[in-house]
Image (cartoon, coloured by chain):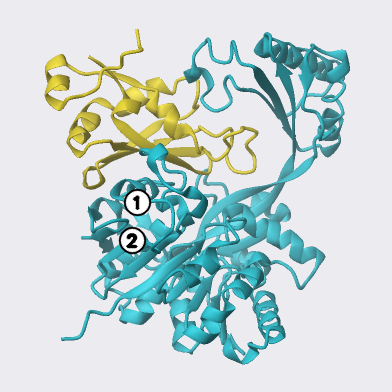
Amino acid sequence: MTAKKIVRVAGAQGFWGDWLEAPRRQAEGGPVDYLMLDYLAEVTMSILQKQKERDPAAGYAKDFVGAMESVLGGVAERGIKVIANAGGVNPEACAAAVLEMARARGAGGKLRVGVVTGDNLLPRIDELITAGHELKNMETGEPLSIVRDRVIAANAYIGSVPIVEALAKGANVVITGRSTDTALTMAPLRYEFGWGATEWNKLAAGIIAGHIIECGAQCSGGNCLYEWRSIENLADVGYPIVEAQADGTFVVTKHPNTGGRVSVQTVTEQLVYEMGDPHAYITPDVVADFTSIHLEPDGTNRVRVFGIEGKPATDKLKVSIAYRSGYKAIGSLVYAWPDALEKAQLADRVLRERLDRLGLHFEHVLSEFVGANATHGPLAGAEAGRHAPEVQYRIGVRDADRKKVERFTREIVPLVLNGPPSVTGFAGGRPKTEEIVAYWPALVDKTVVETRVTVLQ
Amino acid sequence: MRVRLLDVAHARSGDKGDTANVGLIALKPEWYDMLAKYVTRDRVAAHFTGVITGAVERYELPNLKALNFLLHGALDGGGTLSLKTDAQGKVFSTALLRMVVDIPDEEAAALGLPRAMDLA
């Protein structure tokens, strides 16, 4: 009897900015079949769109080229495949940069890079609105037309289908734009096991495997509250690996001789992270039911996941739209003992009075006292911060008028010499005025979005 | 008997727009039913008075021994609009664990619940 086929997908990046060491450690620390790298958050697409406006060859997660370089041996010599949504708003340029890096390293012929496009709806927005797609804000119900002139990015969240297609065409590296985080894990499982488009329970299992490993070490001991003191060797934390079987059951684990922990508790904390209605986790491929998930220990640093159920997918795709929405600036100063909180509170009153006298009224102003109320607000209690050795005073403003926000940034540092005493922590000088790019979630009919797959060598 | 959630549960939180979610997980599987019974939507809404501006929703996940709370209007507008230190709702988890619930003594004793000693 032959052993059951196991496919190993390793989470190697949980967001753009994650640990640069993780991909190489996942490729070299033990057997893996696929590396999954998730780079995109809602805000990321708009940052990348701004970069592309300045440079047509930019607009993708540049970290990915370095990540590919760090795992090139594993991909070129040992058959490891890579799935990443590093393409951002320019997957073609990302693929070109990866191929150029590989050629410079003498491995140009070893990569077949599948590029998935079609998620970018920015050039098609007016066409869509004209055709009756209002792209209403899912939270407020307002039509997109009210912010149309300020839109800078619009991308449909795409699912597993084009990634499976790229793998079927022989790609060993697949680069997408705004595919869902979870599809990056589900697609290779679907490809390897030949799961059909209506095998809802198996597709849902692949999605939940993806949800568990999409935030990197956050399921393997990182940011884990449960018995956190006893989690060993976080300096050497092992990123997660899914060992999946054809029936949709899987084990979450990590490489041997790494730090961190994989337990029912570490996996449960990640399962509830950013959860909405657990009965209906909606993705382009399937609606997964988190109330069907069963977890059980399966040896040291191994958790078995089974029983997962899914329901038919909807006929819509979510669209992530980014639009310019004014400006903000946040400044801070640090007040020292004695009476640090009282001094910081006086600084706040003085500053607000000065802003008032300047006639500066903002759409929104928020003051926080770090060390007293910044994280838990009034829940921290009336005495919180009262005897703290230091308190950071932090004030932010938001407004449509850039000039007003910039004038605000000039009012912080003077407080060092003309406000309450025992103040420091102003080394950064004036705070920076930032343009706010806000997020507009919408739905669009699936039939509107056509993905394309190209394999480059 | 007064029981602090920190002593009977662990938690993780995150964001979706201006909504924070907190997943509350029983430290021992046999404590889940007690959490489901006493950590009600209304009590959690009362706990977060003055902290959030919107409503609270609650979902039960007996399979994971967890409750999921959605706290609307929690993040000062959320995402890039927010001016808060915790714009992504990362530490609403421990804010919920500050909550204290009253459990009938008999029930608390049967479950071996730890008493919130340092609380009045």
x, y (%) of residue A394? 69, 26
State the residue position of label 2. Answer: A252
| Residue sitting nearer the eye, A132 or A380 | A380
Q: Residue at x 53, y 22 (%)?
A: A377
The residue at 54%/28% (across/down) is A375
Q: Where does the image place residue A357, in percent across and percent down from the top left?
A: 85, 15
Q: Is disc 1 placed on a helix, strand or loop? A: helix
Q: Is there a contact, CB below 8 Å, between mark 1 and mark 2?
A: yes
What chain is the cyan one? A
Alpha-carbon span between mark 1 and mark 2: 8 Å
Q: Sequence-wise, which precedes: disc 1 or disc 2?
A: 2
Give the camera-side residue of B98 and A3: A3
Coordinates of residue B109 in the picture (x, y in percent): 14, 20
Label 1: how many residues lie within 10 Å, few (<14), some (14-19) or many (20+)? Answer: many
Is the N terminus of chain A in the top left, top right, bottom left or bottom right quadrant? Answer: bottom left
Quadrant of the snapshot with the C terminus of chain A: bottom right
Dot label at residue A267:
1
Please, which chain is the residue tagged with disc 2 on?
Answer: A
Residue under the image location 69 percent in, 76 percent down: A93
Percent position (x, y) of residue A381?
49, 14
**Chain B shade:** yellow
Tell me the amino acid under the disc marked 2: Val
| Residue at mark 1: chain | A
Relative to A321, residue B46 above or below: above
